[in-house]
Amino acid sequence: MFDYQLKLRKSLPAWAFEWMAGICGTANERGKVGVLILRTPRMKNADALVVVRFSDWVLLHGSPGGAEVSKVALVKAFERAERVMR
């Protein structure tokens, strides 16, 4: 159903993480998953980007490889990626 691609960058915009923190905080209080939709003025809604925390994605849809992934495994994977980017 999904075709995954991971894009690693040395840094990502701080505002995106600030927005996600607020969105996810509010969603968690309501027992929901936070979703950020990004688009520019005059961009078609169909072309907007949808951002969900990877841990929430895995809980909703399973891991990209099909095997279940624990939150501990996710944290370790992200820590390894951070070390590579340094």
Image (cartoon, grey):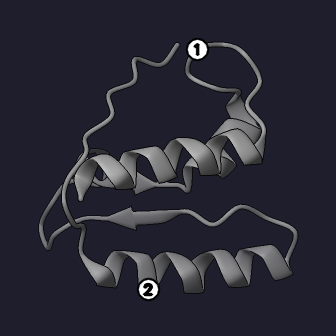
Position of 60 compared to 43: left or right?
A: right
Residue type highlighted by circle 2: Glu
Residue type highlighted by circle 1: Gly
Label 2: element kind: helix
Residue carrying label 2: 18
- The answer for how far apart the CA atoms under marks 1 and 2 are is 29 Å
Crowding at label 1, few (<14), some or many (≥20) Cα neighbours within 10 Å? few
Residue 11: which quarter of the image?
bottom left
Residue 86 position (above or below residue 3): below
Residue 3 position (above or below residue 38): above
Residue 10 is marked as none
Nearer to us of marks 1 and 2 is: 1
Position of 73 compared to 53: left or right?
A: right
Number of labels in the image equals 2
The residue at 39%/24% (across/down) is 4
The spot of residue 25 in percent (x, y) is: 69, 82
Position of 18 compared to 48: left or right?
A: right
* The one of 40 and 75 positioned closer to us in this rendering: 75
Label 1: element kind: loop
* The one of 33 and 86 positioned closer to us in this rendering: 86
Residue carrying label 1: 65
The spot of residue 19 in percent (x, y) is: 45, 82
Dot 1 or dot 2, earlier in sequence: 2
Residue 21: which quarter of the image?
bottom right
The spot of residue 18 in percent (x, y) is: 44, 85
Crowding at label 2, few (<14), some or many (≥20) Cα neighbours within 10 Å? few
* The one of 79 and 54 positioned closer to us in this rendering: 79
Q: Quadrant of the C terminus?
A: bottom left
Position of 61 compared to 46: left or right?
A: right
The residue at 45%/45% (across/down) is 80
Label 2 near label 1: C-beta < 8 Å? no
